[in-house]
């Protein structure tokens, strides 16, 4: 636009040419706008809107499945900071509880990380897990005392393996950027679960955690 204005000021001879170019541009913009126009959503009646919200807000059979994991669980984990690094062990406990009328499951995690040489570090984390009735996906958040960020993930359910596979992003301060993360959470039976976490380093995925979780008797 600046180039066109300067040309008009310097050479009025090109005025007609510029007008022609402007006309073509407007025609092109009009075509682009038309192509981007979306079909308006169907307008719902007040009754239909209320029904849609009720269906969205009502806990489903998937939420009932999550509720079966309420209670206290004991976990034993191995963690790897890099593909070739030695494993760090951790033992911990998680207390799961459905909240907000059975719509989400909140988990409080506590434990100790083996730092080697007989040294341990206390660990604490909190997560929420829910199922979006409309999007048909699991959604989770995670925070802990090992960082200051929040990890957000979305996942789908595989009935054959009884596994939720979730993907998301987390910040890696060592790499100075967000990295891709993946989690598989398998329900082996009502009292035994298995979780695996995968991260990326130098663009390659590797398993950085594996945990067996058993219901406390």
Image (cartoon, helix red, strand yellow):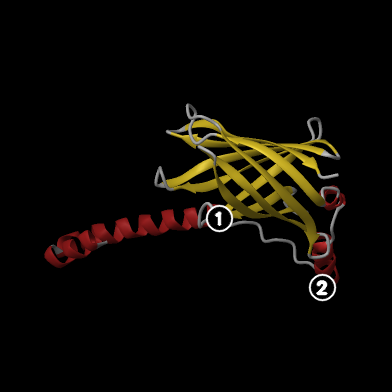
Q: Can residue 132 be seen in this view?
A: no
- Measuring 60% from the left and 51% from the top, which residue is drawn there? 123
Above or below, 36 against 88 in this view is below
| Label 2 Cα crowd, 10 Å radius (few <14 / some 14-19 / many 20+) | few
Q: Residue 210, position in %: x, y?
A: 64, 34
- Measuring 68% from the left and 45% from the top, which residue is drawn there? 92
Kindly report which numbered mark, 2 or 1, lies closer to the viewer in this rendering: 1
Checking the image for residue 119, the label placed there is none
- Measuring 86% from the left and 48% from the top, which residue is drawn there? 68
* Residue wearing tag 1: 145
* Residue wearing tag 2: 46
- Give the residue at the far left of this rendering: 10
Q: In which quarter of the image is residue 5?
A: bottom left
User: In what quadrant of the picture does the N terminus appear?
Assistant: bottom left
Question: Does residue 163 appear to the left or right of 87 in the view shown?
Answer: right
Distance of mark 2 from mark 1, alpha carbons? 46 Å
């Amino acid at each position: 636009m600046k180039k066109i204005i300067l040309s008009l000021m310097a050479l009025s001879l090109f005025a007609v040419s510029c007008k022609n170019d402007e006309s073509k541009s407007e025609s092109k913009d009009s075509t682009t706008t038309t192509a981007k126009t979306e079909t308006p959503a169907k307008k719902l009646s007040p009754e239909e809107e209320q029904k849609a919200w009720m269906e969205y807000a009502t806990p489903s059979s998937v939420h009932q499945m999550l509720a079966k994991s309420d209670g206290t669980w004991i976990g034993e984990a191995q963690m790897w900071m890099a593909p070739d690094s030695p494993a760090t062990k951790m033992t911990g406990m998680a207390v799961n509880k459905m909240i907000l009328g059975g719509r989400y499951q909140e988990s409080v995690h506590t434990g100790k990380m083996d730092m080697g040489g007989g040294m341990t570090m206390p660990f604490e984390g909190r997560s929420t897990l829910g199922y979006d009735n409309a999007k048909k996906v699991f959604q989770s958040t995670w925070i802990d005392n090992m960082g200051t960020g929040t990890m957000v993930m979305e996942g789908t359910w595989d009935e054959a393996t009884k596994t939720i596979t979730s993907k998301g992003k987390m910040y890696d301060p060592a790499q100075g950027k967000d990295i891709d993360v993946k989690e598989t959470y398998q329900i082996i039976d009502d009292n035994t679960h298995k979780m695996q976490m995968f991260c990326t380093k130098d663009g390659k995925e590797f398993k950085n955690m594996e945990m067996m979780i058993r219901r406390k008797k």
